Image (tube, rainbow, N blue to C red):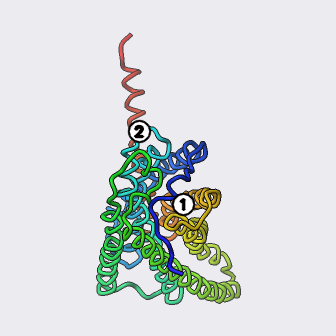
């Protein structure tokens, strides 16, 4: 039976607005916006001081750019969901910032997969350094990923072309043309494919990494250097972030998308899927706050540069305070 696509009907009359969506989620996004902008702004500043001398650093730099772009979409979502501004902003959120949010999410997922492959290669062959050709290939691959994801996402902006009204902006699907709904569902399946490919890559790589670390642990234990294990174990932060942030959402996204693009779901089911989707979507947003821990734990150059920067700031702050104290003491009564 041919599926029925609709931008009206049942779905238009089923609203999910209440205190949870208007108060709780905006507060949660506000928290991660301020934390994320500070952490990623600092990470970006540190990465500007580090040369792209390895594939790993190239992939990390792309990840922090993706995270900053994602974070910049949060204020629009916060204001729109909390209904603190006019309904016209909701149309902009549906057409632009929501698309950018998903665009950056899948770029982050792809780069987490590439970082995992790089960490496996580093674990399996710890003394092999990246050549200039490998770094150049990593840069070209990164550019291709951005172009591919942008090409996939741009039609979602263009095809969200129904005129916004106070009623149809309540659901972004109602702003899409008929082909826009079809394209939205196609993109959803492509993104699901991207996720599951990277999911398999991460599972396989971490299975192999675990085997390598176990072999290393057995060797170092025999040599009386068992503390080596606690250093290498930090590599598992990547799979931890991936499972916390991205896995729950991808179990919820397909049924939610179907509920948005087809008139086959009851209103109560649509609302339930909406809350599940919003809760797991917030977890994906949390990735922007957790990625800096990956940089600090696994990138020695980043860690050294960050600590050096913080040390300079601490010295400068103490110097300013000392100057102020001296000035106070020399001020005549």
Which badge, 1 or 2, comes first in the chain's sequence? 2
Q: Which residue corresponds to mark 1?
A: 281
Corner quadrant of residue 175: bottom left
Q: Quadrant of the N terminus?
A: bottom right
Report whether 315 appears left or right of 282: left
Q: In the displayed structure, would residue 315 be above or below residue 193?
A: above
Q: Nearer the viewer, mark 1 or mark 2?
A: 2
Q: In the displayed structure, would residue 188 be above or below residue 133?
A: above
Residue 94 screen position, x and y as percent: 40, 56
- Labels 1 and 2 touching (C-beta < 8 A): no
Helix, strand or loop at disc 1? helix
Q: Which residue corresponds to mark 2?
A: 85
| Point 46% across, 75% down: residue | 191
Question: Which sits in the foreground, 221 or 196?
Answer: 196
Report whether 323 appears left or right of 199: left
Quote the CA–CA distance across marks 1 and 2: 22 Å
Q: Which mark is residue 124?
A: none
């Amino acid at each position: 039976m041919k599926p029925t696509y609709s931008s009206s009907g049942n779905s238009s009359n089923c609203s999910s607005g209440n205190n949870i969506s208007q108060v709780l989620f905006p507060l949660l996004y506000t928290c991660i916006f301020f934390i994320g902008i500070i952490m990623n702004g600092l990470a970006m500043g540190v990465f500007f001081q580090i040369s792209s001398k390895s594939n790993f650093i190239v992939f990390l730099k792309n990840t922090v750019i993706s995270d900053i772009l994602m974070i910049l979409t949060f204020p629009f979502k916060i204001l729109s969901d909390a209904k603190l501004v006019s309904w016209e902003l909701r149309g902009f959120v549906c057409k632009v910032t929501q698309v950018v949010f998903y665009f950056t999410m899948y770029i982050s997922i792809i780069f987490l997969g590439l970082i995992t492959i790089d960490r496996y290669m580093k674990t399996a062959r710890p003394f092999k350094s990246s050549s200039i050709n490998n770094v150049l290939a990593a840069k070209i691959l990164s550019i291709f990923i951005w172009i591919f994801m942008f090409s996939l996402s741009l039609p979602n902006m263009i095809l969200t072309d129904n005129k916004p009204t106070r009623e149809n902006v309540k659901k972004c699907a109602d702003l899409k043309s008929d082909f826009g709904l079809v394209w939205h569902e196609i993109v959803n399946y492509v993104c699901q494919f991207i996720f599951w490919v990277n999911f398999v890559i991460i599972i396989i790589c971490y299975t192999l990494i675990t085997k390598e670390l176990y072999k290393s642990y057995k060797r170092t234990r025999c040599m009386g250097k068992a503390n080596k294990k606690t250093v290498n174990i930090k590599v598992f932060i990547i799979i931890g972030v991936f499972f916390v942030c991205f896995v729950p959402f991808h179990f919820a996204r397909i049924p939610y998308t179907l509920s948005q693009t087809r008139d086959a779901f009851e209103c109560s089911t649509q609302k339930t899927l909406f809350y599940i989707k919003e809760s797991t979507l917030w977890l994906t947003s949390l990735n922007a706050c957790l990625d800096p821990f990956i940089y600090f734990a696994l990138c020695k150059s980043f860690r050294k540069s960050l600590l050096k920067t913080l040390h300079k700031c601490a010295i400068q702050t103490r110097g300013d305070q000392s100057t102020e104290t001296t000035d106070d003491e020399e001020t005549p009564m």
